[in-house]
């Protein structure tokens, strides 16, 4: 599945929760948040977050559910780990998806990301403490690496990430990534700046490429002109030689006399060479 397909799939899988939340209030709306954030294949939440029935949960007995939705829209697993009591109790599927979303955030900020940085940010290293108690994965670095690669492979299969695992250099090489929800005007302005910078870079590259193409075309035209001139000069030389061969008078006097001399030679038979008489002593 491609990143584009994953985006469309996520929107489709969110639709049932949108319909439910539109007609729900209070606890029912809060439950729709908990279910949507744990649902497989749902990675974008802004539409759900924008519903009036969901916005009403910002304060009151269900504010933790609203905080959970914001966490899955914009946050990372470290945000949850730093204050787990600010959210409802998470299911294993919540934690799994939160790591997935955190991976997307990291992959969107760099073309290459070291395994060590990913392992730490996803709370997969042995030193990371799980808020529910105990270590995040295990005591060995190999186990952490396996858990990280499992998380990456899951994202690859889900289509939310296109990347290569460079195990030799222990890094992730990012090609494309599903964008997460945009938080507020500041993040939107930053995105606009990035797009403007990308556009300027692309235009500069296109201008440079166009200039190189024009230069190459000019060189090709010059080569063609030189070749045509060479052929014309050669044709004129051959024509001049042919004319002179057909008209001996066209040659210089010395060449003409030589041509006449050779033309008068008797070549009908072999010449007899006189023999000298040998005298006996």
Image (tube, rainbow, N blue to C red):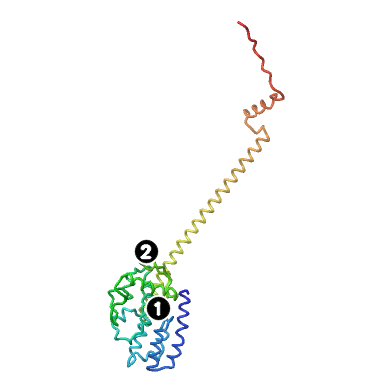
* Residue, disc 1: 180
Question: Front-most of 145 and 253?
Answer: 145
- The image quarter containing residue 134 is bottom left
Q: Is residue 243 left or right of residue 68?
A: right
> Vertically, is 225 above or below 274?
below
* Residue, disc 2: 168
Q: Residue at x 53, y 53 (%)?
A: 220
Secondary structure found at label 2: loop
Is the Cβ of the residue at disc 2 closer than 8 Å to that at disc 1? no
Q: Is residue 210 left or right of residue 145?
A: right
Across and down, in percent, residue 163 comes to: 42, 69
**Within 10 Å of the Cα at label 2, are there few (<14), some (14-19), or many (20+) other Cα atoms?**
few
Across and down, in percent, residue 118 comes to: 34, 72
- The image quarter containing residue 62 is bottom left
> Vertically, is 229 above or below 104?
above
> Vertically, is 15 above or below 234?
below
Image quarter of the C terminus? top right
């Amino acid at each position: 599945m491609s990143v584009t397909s994953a985006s469309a799939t996520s929107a489709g899988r969110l639709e049932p929760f949108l319909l439910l939340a539109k007609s729900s209030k209070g606890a029912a709306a809060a439950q729709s948040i908990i279910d949507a954030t744990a649902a497989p294949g749902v990675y974008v939440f802004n539409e759900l977050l924008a519903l009036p029935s969901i916005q009403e949960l910002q304060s009151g007995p269900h504010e933790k559910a609203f905080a959970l939705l914001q966490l899955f829209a914009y946050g990372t697993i470290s945000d949850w780990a730093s204050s787990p009591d600010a959210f409802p109790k998470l299911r294993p599927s919540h934690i799994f998806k939160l790591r997935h979303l955190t991976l997307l955030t990291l992959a969107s900020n760099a073309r290459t990301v070291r395994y060590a940085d990913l392992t730490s940010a996803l709370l997969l290293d042995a030193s990371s403490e799980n808020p529910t108690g105990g270590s995040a994965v295990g005591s060995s670095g190999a186990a952490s690496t396996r858990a990280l690669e499992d998380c990456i492979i899951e994202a690859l299969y889900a289509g939310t990430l296109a990347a290569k695992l460079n195990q030799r250099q222990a890094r992730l090489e990012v090609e494309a990534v599903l964008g997460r929800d945009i938080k507020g005007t500041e993040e939107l302005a930053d995105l606009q700046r990035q797009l403007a910078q990308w556009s300027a870079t692309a235009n500069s590259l296109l201008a440079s490429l166009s200039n190189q193409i024009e230069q190459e075309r000019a060189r090709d035209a010059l080569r063609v002109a030189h070749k045509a001139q060479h052929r014309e000069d050669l044709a004129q030389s051959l024509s001049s030689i042919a004319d002179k061969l057909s008209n001996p008078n066209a040659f210089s006097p010395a060449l003409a006399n030589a041509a006449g001399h050779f033309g008068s030679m008797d070549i009908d038979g072999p010449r007899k060479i006189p023999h000298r008489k040998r005298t006996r002593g």
